[in-house]
Amino acid sequence: MYIWRNIKTINMNLAGRKKEIKLLQGLLQKKSPEFVAVYGRRRVGKTYLIREVYKQQIVFECSGLHQKSMGQQLENFWLTLQEYRNVSTSTLPPKTWLQAFSQLKMHLNTLEESKKVVFLDEIPWFETPQSGFLAALSNFWNAYCSKRSDIILVICGSAASWIIKKVINDRGGLHNRVTTHIRLMPFSLLETKIYLEMQQVQLTLKDLVQLYMCIGGIPFYLSHVKAGKSIPQILDDLFFLPQAALEQEFQNLYAALFKNSDLHERVVAALSSKNKGLSRKEIITKTKSGGGLTIALKELIECSFVQETIPYYSNSKTIQYRLVDEFTLFYFRFLAKETTKNSWLQISSKSKYKIWSGLAFENVCLKHIAQIKQKLGISGIITRDFPWSHKGNKLEKGAQIDLVIDRSDNCVNLLEFKFYDTPFEIAKRDAAELNQKIQVFKDKTKTKKNVFLTFLSVYGVKKNKYYLSIVTNQLLIEDLFAEIWLLH
């Protein structure tokens, strides 16, 4: 039986992450061994989260080395362990991972009886061909950690698919051993706002949304935003000036996440060409490759780059794959094919910016459906949420709806997203198109539910006669910054 002192709450320099912090801190109070897996895309803040929450409990932390040999990984592990050891004498460098974990056990046995965290970062990089790392990790947990109530073993990595396949869903020695797993997502708009304010960066809500449309809620990207600068200046610093902070990010991003990343890059390049997504067959045609596509798509989905869309109210049951990573979309629209450096002011004055901004704003809204539902007062209602479109022909009109919220209370919200610099005003022509959309949706879906038209815009929609005749309610971008109140 191990007895530990009461865990004191510490002040953490973290923006948001309330749910993850509460979960991780709760493990400190449990009198049982814990095996925690944290995964998510590169630059999303996994390591920082673990270090901040467990800064007083980490007794060993080691990170795998990217594309290094087994010998180099073992040497790194051993050298790191020597830094943590409280004795002057050192052990011999291990030749196997079993020996390496045996040395770690000896170190842990010398420590006082209190909650202690062993943190293995970028764990996929430890496993080199025929190294035996996973077998040794399994032995370390099953034969040692699982018998001690004072140890929290935390593994972390950007290669989400590796952790899911090799650890969480393992059918061998690690089967059902993970007690807690966290998929760390990018910041929401609210968390982005809080994070930037902690850096003394003050921006209007519209500017925050525009910045999010370009780089998403990735903490590392946001860390390069400087106070006192406008959005054009910030984006020039990030992308367009000499030695820009994110100039080489795309070249490094996928290579660091995936083995044989060429296919992943070709897939996202293909998806970037179609705003509403592509079917698997269309992806194969564009990438000229079918082998390995299933795995690549799964990995891209698990790392939050791609979203799988299941069609509703459609004769076609073909799954669509949509690129939803803001940085990747921005890269292919404005950086990938540019041969000369521009400034953001020059780019934003062109027509392709206006087309992109509408689609990028739609993407941001789709990532904040929980906030939209909360503002509409339907958080507790079961819903299906999806974009919807019907391709017209010579005989009938087509229609495209940014978001459908199909509710179990016999209602449907059809949402229109508008990213305008001024309040949007519905003209006679707009009203005719909106009425047509609603009618096409009703005809093609055969819905018998109440259909409500809802607008979400930057500065609102003017309440003229057309608004009053067809719009049920409207939301503003400030509603996307709402804190989600969980029911449990």
Image (tube, rainbow, N blue to C red):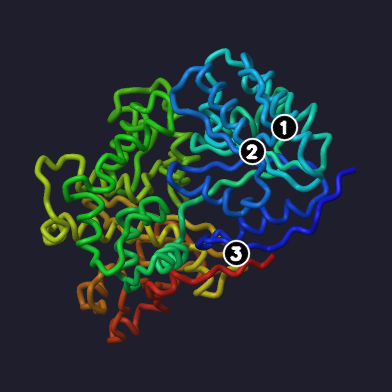
Q: Position of residue 61 (x, y in %)?
A: 60, 38
| Lower position in the chain sequence, tag 3 or tag 2 | 3
Task: Please identify, in this view, whether the residue under mark 1 or under mark 2 is nearer the observer.
Answer: 1
SS at badge 2: strand
Residue 294 visible from this viewpoint: no
Q: Of residues 315 and 113, which is closer to you in this image? A: 113
Q: Amino acid at mark 3?
A: Asn
Q: Whole-percent x and y of residue 395?
A: 24, 53
- Residue with the mark numbered 1: 107
Residue type, numbered disc 2: Phe
Disc with the residue nearer the chain's start (1 vs 2):
2
Q: Nearer the viewer, residue 123 or 168?
A: 123
Residue 379 locus on image (x, y percent): 58, 68
User: In the image as oriented, which residue stretches furthest toward the front?
Assistant: 88
Q: Report crowding for label 3: few under 14, some 14 to 19, many 20 or more residues within 10 A (C-alpha).
A: few
The residue that mark 3 highlights is: 11
Depth check, front residue: 220 or 192: 220
Whether residue 397 sits left or right of residue 92 in the image: it is left
